[in-house]
Image (cartoon, rainbow, N blue to C red):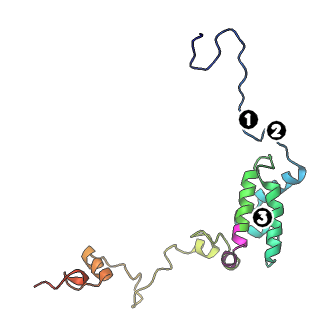
Amino acid sequence: MPAATASGADTNGSTTRNREHNQGNQDKKYTIEQKTAVIRVRKCSATAFYEILGIEKGCSDAEIKKAYRKLSLLTHPDKNAYDGADEAFKMVSRAFQILSDSEKKGRYDRFGGDPDSRFGSASASSASPFSGFARSPGGRGPMFDDEISPEELFNRFFGGGGMGGPFGGEQE
């Protein structure tokens, strides 16, 4: 019996075979229409959802769904081997995810940007991310800018004035 080698090569005189690993899409092709769709989508801004789907603002839900179906078939990486098809497909899917949800679509239409991002809207990018915090009653800045001890914080949460609080009787 021949000895095994670390490389896995056969040592008893036979020729070794070239062991190529196919990634799955080397043999796949793409059409001109698929290539054009990928190039067009990838040129769009990541948050230009209407432009990505190739539809106008204010279109119906049926038109959004129809545009998504068409583009997702053209850009799906299992059907399109053109470079960048996977990124284009993700952009198309994200656009549909936002525009098919009435709440997210409303926020996108009002503020722009990605409605799921904390800093995605145009107004949020120019303002401080902390601008929405409550102000103190006197209007002197954030409500909680004074230092507070852990005991005081505990008492505020659990409503105890003394050590007894809600967990026990009053101390004597």
Where does label 1 land, which residue?
22
On residue 27, which mark appears?
Answer: 2
Q: CA distance from mark 2 to mark 3?
A: 28 Å
The magenta stretch spans residue 104 = yes
Q: Position of residue 82 (x, y in %)?
A: 80, 47
The answer to which quarter of the image holds residue 88 is bottom right
Secondary structure of the residue carrying numbered label 1: loop
Vertically, is 86 above or below 25?
Answer: below
Given the image, on which type of amino acid does mark 2 rest? Answer: Asp
Nearer to me, 73 or 39: 73
Where does label 3 land, which residue?
52
Seen at 71% across and 78% down, the residue is 109
Mark 1, other Cα within 10 Å: few <14 / some 14–19 / many ≥20: few
Secondary structure of the residue carrying numbered label 2: loop
> Looking at the image, do the residues carrying marks 1 and 2 touch, with CB atoms under 8 Å apart?
yes
96 lies left or right of 131: right
Q: Which residues are magenta?
A: 97-107
Q: Nearer the viewer, mark 3 or mark 1?
A: 1
The answer to which quarter of the image holds residue 62 is bottom right
Vertically, is 37 above or below 5?
Answer: below
Instruction: In the displayed orientation, state which residue is furthest to the right.
Output: 32
Instruction: In the displayed orientation, state which residue is furthest to the left.
Output: 172
45 lies left or right of 119: right
